Amino acid sequence: MAFDANGILKGLYSGALVPMDENDVAAVSLTPNSDGNAVVDIRKTGAKGLAAVAIYLGPSASEQALLVNNDIANLIIEASDELIGKWEPVAAFPVVHYHVLELYVTATAAFVAADIGETVTQETTADTGILIAFDPELAVNLSTGKLYIAVTAETDVFNEAAGKTVNTTTGNSTKTYGAGTTVASPVEAPGIYVVRFATNKRYVRCNCEDVTDSYGNVWILLTDNAFVTL
């Protein structure tokens, strides 16, 4: 099947898309709830292996103004043989962080896996954020690469011309590219995410309850023939 009305996990309610936010309620019916969430009966399609596609259309200006902290969208595909109860996770979309900075640094201590999730602080400006990933090169002392930081507030721009960022665990790093910080915000620009899964359960839904603030309008669709994304 391609995208069609029989494979919509999140879509229209009363003819309009409903912004996905922290008040989102997971579906327990084949009929969309007031958040636009619905259960899909995949027994009708006979499909065992499917792809779920989340299409972020982006927040409105008023919604974007609320997304100033380390906001995330953590969407889980769940399956069950019953509409109410016994829902089990079968796949998860990548966690989408709203405000993410790519920061070039030279490591003065090798970064390790335990550094993920730690607070990164810029020495002079005291800008802060959470380390969500780092380039593999930074696992070697004195190497250069990128830190990916979910900033604590929109004003945390990590743009001092010279100074240090300090990870609270192992990886101290000297910033080498001062004002050259690049901003990567996957939700400010529309984003598409695809996950594949297989289940023998009858019903499938997307649980969008682990969302901070409003991420704007989002379609979540099922298909057995998803397009390739980069």
Image (cartoon, rainbow, N blue to C red):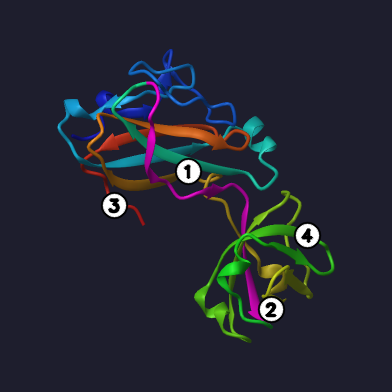
Name the mark nearer the viewer: 4 or 1: 4
Q: Mark 4 and mark 3 in contact (Cβ < 8 Å)?
A: no
Q: Quadrant of residue 6?
A: top left
- Front in this rendered view, residue 57 or 150: 150
The local crowd at label 2, few if under 14, some if 14 to 19, many if 20 or more residues have their Cα within 10 Å, is some
Up the image or down, 2 lies above or below 25; here it is: below
Q: N-terminal of the two: label 3 or label 2?
A: 2
Tell me which residue sits at (69%, 83%) in the image.
Answer: 108
Q: Which residue is mark 2?
A: 176
Majority secondary structure of magenta residues: strand
Q: Disc 2 marks which amino acid?
A: Thr
User: Looking at the rendered structure, which numbered label has been put on residue 127?
Assistant: 4
Q: CA distance from mark 3 to mark 2?
A: 36 Å
Instruction: Identify the magenta region.
Output: 84-107
User: Looking at the rendered structure, which numbered label has been put on residue 228?
Assistant: 3
Q: N-terminal of the two: label 3 or label 1?
A: 1
Q: Disc 3 marks which amino acid?
A: Val
Q: Secondary structure at mark 4?
A: loop
The local crowd at label 4, few if under 14, some if 14 to 19, many if 20 or more residues have their Cα within 10 Å, is many
Q: Secondary structure at mark 2?
A: loop
Q: CA distance from mark 1 to mark 2?
A: 30 Å
Q: Secondary structure at mark 1?
A: loop
Q: Which residue is mark 1?
A: 190
Q: CA distance from mark 4 to mark 2?
A: 16 Å
Point out the residue furthest to the right here. Answer: 124
Q: Disc 4 marks which amino acid?
A: Asp
